[in-house]
Amino acid sequence: MQRLLIILGLTTLLAGLLWPWLGKLPLGRLPGDIIIQRENFRLYFPLTTGVVLSLVLTLLLWIFRK
């Protein structure tokens, strides 16, 4: 549990430091993300972004476990 918390903390720190460059990535605007806009309503459902992030995190966790 301690190792997991340290890794999550370091990952959060790294993401915070790299945020200016990470913000330029097209995550959140991928084909397959659902956006419905009406007059006073906006629904955003990042379906493809969620799948891509899940695959990347799964791969990273799988690598770190070995």
Image (cartoon, helix red, strand yellow):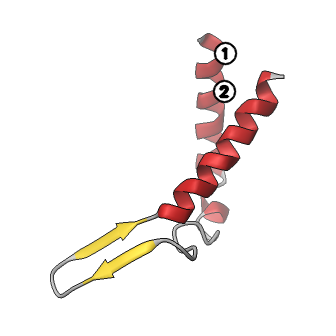
Residue 29 rendering spot, x and y as whole percentages: 53, 74
Where does the image place residue 21, in percent across and percent down from the top left?
A: 67, 64
**Residue that mark 1 sits on:** 3
Q: Give the side of residue 39 with respect to residue 65, left or right.
A: left
Dot 2: element = helix
- Circle 1: residue type: Arg
Number of marks in the rendered image: 2
Tag 1–tag 2 contact (CB < 8 Å): yes
Q: Residue 20 in the image: x percent, y percent?
A: 61, 63
Which image quadrant for residue 26? bottom right
Residue ID at (19%, 77%) = 41
Question: Considering only vertical position in the picture, is 18 above or below 36?
Answer: above
CA distance for labels 1 and 2: 6 Å
- Residue 65 point in image, percent of width and height: 77, 23
- Other residues around mark 1 within 10 Å, as few (<14) / some (14–19) / many (≥20): few
In depth, the one of 47 and 41 nearer the eye is 47
Provide the secondary structure element on which disc 1 rests: helix
Q: Which residue is drawn at 36% across and 69% down?
A: 44
Q: Residue furthest right?
A: 66
For the N terminus, give its image quadrant: top right
Which residue was labeled with disc 2?
7
Q: Quadrant of the C terminus?
A: top right
Residue type for callout 2? Ile
**Is 4 located above or below residue 58 in the figure?**
above
Q: Quadrant of residue 27?
A: bottom right
Q: In this view, does 20 lie above or below 37?
A: above
Give the label on residue 14, or none.
none
